[in-house]
Image (tube, grey):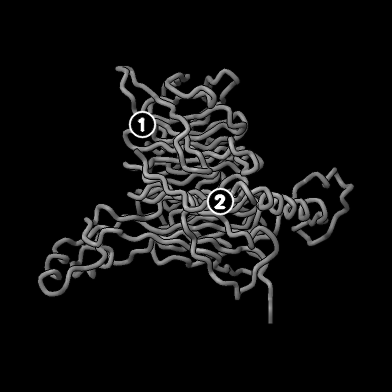
Amino acid sequence: MEDVNTLGHMEIDEHQTELNDNLLSAVNDETINSPQVDHTNGNTNSQSDVNEEYLPQYIPLFADKTLVELCNSSWSLSNKKASGELQPYLRGCKWSPDGTCCLSVVNNDGVHVQELPRDLYTANVSRERTIDILDSIIHIKESGLVYDFCWYPGMNSNVPESCCWLTTRQNAPVQMWDAFDGSLRCSYRGFNAVDEMEPALSVTFNLDGTRIIAGYKKALRTFDVERPGREFVEHKTNSPASCFATDRNLVAMGSWNTTITLYNINEMGTYKSIGKMHGHTGGVTHMKFTPDGLKLVSGARKDNKLLVWDIRYYRRPLNILSRVVDTNQRIYFDISPCGKYLVSGGTDGIVKVWDENAVSWKDGLDVADVDKDNVTFKFPLHTDCCNSISIHPLRPILATGSGQYHFVDHQAIFEDDIKTEPMENTCDVNAKDLNTKYSSSCENSLVFWWIGDVEDNT
């Protein structure tokens, strides 16, 4: 059985409504009361122009070109004598759609849920703010490697039945978990041709949350959310589905064979292939559509390129952005809700930000500048691999996660054990071998950063 730890869940039933109301009122104030700003020339336009009063206005991000650390949480080996194979490190983090909490997956430690502190729901922060230490309000110790996870797109803490997420892991079906108490709600099982249950490699919801799309080695299977079990619609594929991106009736499927396939999914759950995109040198691990649905950004393992595609003309990339990815691990990136900022981490621990107004990362590809780093901002936030990036849906807050698997020089450990006391953490090995695959740098943390305007108290 899964070990579920519900550490107080902040008395959600009592004040979660208040927190959501604060978030929504804060965003509505920015959306309704703020004038329209033309960022190209700094002019303020009247709200009567082209019905712009209906266009959402978002809080400016990275305006101060500085980040303020708000909260952090870290993981370490609970057993000091444990093998280096049990290294705990963050493998992904995602904000909930209503912005009240962050879901993270930790290697060999299951799934964690951390809540956003109440003071961050409204107003700005100052540089003197005390850094909070985050505790997991829910901890599910899932056995096996978690392949993929996602929130229910309509998740709202005011509606308990909508508060859930999906995980797919090694030797297990797709599972739906309750975000209030961490209980297992139901499972969606895919079976192969010989009636053997097989785990999905990737999973996502469609935009309205009525279907679950699960990717397998040789098939895509669509489940009805309201009908758990083994009932599904299957679409055969020629390659494993390593990741998904969805927008309206479009589904982009990335594969380990370096290709991206676009599908149109109809109301009956059947797929029609639109075309394939080629450009990565490694297996595709993460993709995301821009808010307008016209562009697709993709990243791959051991591939230092982020490719920007125009899905209307997908034969070649529209633009190429540079980051550092020297591992097979999935390195997440995110696009701001306003669509103006693309943020990505890298194995060098540096967070890169591309501002559409500054570098036109969605406009086109200059062949002469393919190898040029046209990033707008660089923030060296972590000493280890920054593999997770998630931008808060309503507030100027960025969640970053760090960590990766470190190969351990067992010969160095053996020699040190003879000379000194046993080491407390295998990640702290000071490898004397010249082989570069051994590393002594180890950081496993989830950190929230303020990326909006910072109050000046001087």
Horizontal relation, residue 97 to residue 204: left or right: right
Residue 414 at what x, y percent from top left?
Answer: 12, 65
Horizontal relation, residue 334 to residue 326: left or right: right
Q: In the rendered view of the protein, which quadrant contains the N terminus?
A: top left
**Residue identified by numbered label 1:** 199
Q: Amino acid at mark 1?
A: Pro
Residue 36 at what x, y percent from top left?
Answer: 81, 54
Is residue 374 something that shows in the picture?
Answer: no
**Residue identified by numbered label 2:** 101
370 in relation to 412, above or below: above
At horizontal 53% and vertical 27% (from top left) the residue drawn is 225
Residue 432 position by quadrant: bottom left
Query: Which label lies toward us, 1 or 2?
Result: 2
Task: Return the residue nearer the eye: 344 or 163.
Answer: 163
Task: Return the residue nearer the eye: 87 or 378.
Answer: 87
Residue 199 at what x, y percent from top left?
Answer: 36, 31
User: Secondary structure beneath disc 2?
Assistant: strand
